[in-house]
Image (cartoon, rainbow, N blue to C red):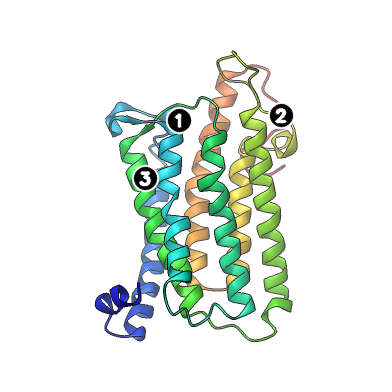
Amino acid sequence: MDSLLSRLFSSQEDELYILDLMAYFMVFMAVCTFFSLLFQNVPYGRYASSVYGFPVNVKFAWFIQEMPSLFLPLALVLWTSSAKTSLLPNQLLIAMFLCHYFQRTLIYPFLIRGGKPTPFASFALAFVFCIYNGYMQIRYLSHYAEYPAYWVSHPCFIAGSCLWLVGWLMNIHSDHILRNLRKPGETGYKIPRGGMFQYVSGANFLGEITEWAGFALAAHSIHSSAFAIFTTVVLTSRAMAHHKWYINKFEDYPKSRKALIPFVI
């Protein structure tokens, strides 16, 4: 792995420069995505269309597209001379990232019940994004990120870590509620209830946004911030679309429930 990276980059300064450019480009793409999603929903699930390519089995799609965010970071940590992985702040931040994608890659896909196929274009773009982001986040944390010795006791790290944990648990619990909406043999859509769904239509999205916002606060870098911004843009659009769909679909949909932020929007 080290030999491959040495062929790609002439020096560590060169690689760090590229990592920074990748982060700024992700912010730019978040802006572009924000404007494009004003006119078009993300093509997946109930919004899927044959226009975006042939359908891919949803369990297969989730497993394959999320894999780079787990196995590429593991390769970068285990098979490169990772200069910063002996430091506690870096270890904890890497663990947060890997914990999320371990669940997303090796557990979540195999718990899916039913689920509409994923258009190939959405599947391919998610796969490329996970390669891009998995490399950017973990290569920076494992090789370049420098934190003071007291960083794990700094308010930013503590608050960020707590936000990450709350968001991770919220996301997992919300997915559990969604999976169990239908009894065996039932079809069709139902109103999700319980947990944060009592307050918002996109409880699972709120969980993931909270998770990566906390990660960005704890990691304190342009790379983690870019990921949090991009995630917020995409998942806010999904939450708003879901909320509108629920209101149009169900006459008895709770009037007090908001789209993403309790009591606000």
Q: In this view, does 71 lie to the left or right of 151?
A: left
Left/right placement of residue 31 relative to residue 182 reads left
**Considering the numbered disc 1 on the image, is that residue within a helix, a strand or a loop?**
helix
Q: Position of residue 82 (x, y in %)?
A: 47, 78
Question: Which amino acid does the dot numbered 2 rest on?
Answer: Arg
Give the labeled residue for mark 2: 193
Disc 1 marks which amino acid?
Gly
Q: Residue at x 66, y 52 (%)?
A: 167
Viewer-proximal residue, 132 or 25?
Answer: 132
| Quadrant where the image shows the C terminus | top right
Q: Indicate the secondary structure of the residue bearing disc 3.
A: helix
Earlier in the chain: of badge 2 and badge 3, it is: 3
Q: Nearer the viewer, mark 1 or mark 3?
A: 1
Q: How crowded is mark 3: few (under 14 residues within 10 Å), some or many (20 or more)?
A: few
**Can residue 41 be seen here?**
no
The crowding category of the residue bearing disc 1, from other C-alpha atoms within 10 Å (few below 14, some 14 to 19, many at least 20), is: few
Q: Mark 1 points at which residue?
A: 45
Q: Name the residue under label 3.
A: 36
Q: Does residue 19 lie above or below 190 as drawn?
A: below
The mark nearer the N terminus, 2 or 1, is 1
Task: Select label 2 or label 3 by which is in front.
Answer: 2
Q: Residue at x 39, y 74 (%)?
A: 20
User: Could you say which is closer to the camera, residue 69 or residue 217?
Assistant: 69
**17 relative to 103 in the view: left or right:** left
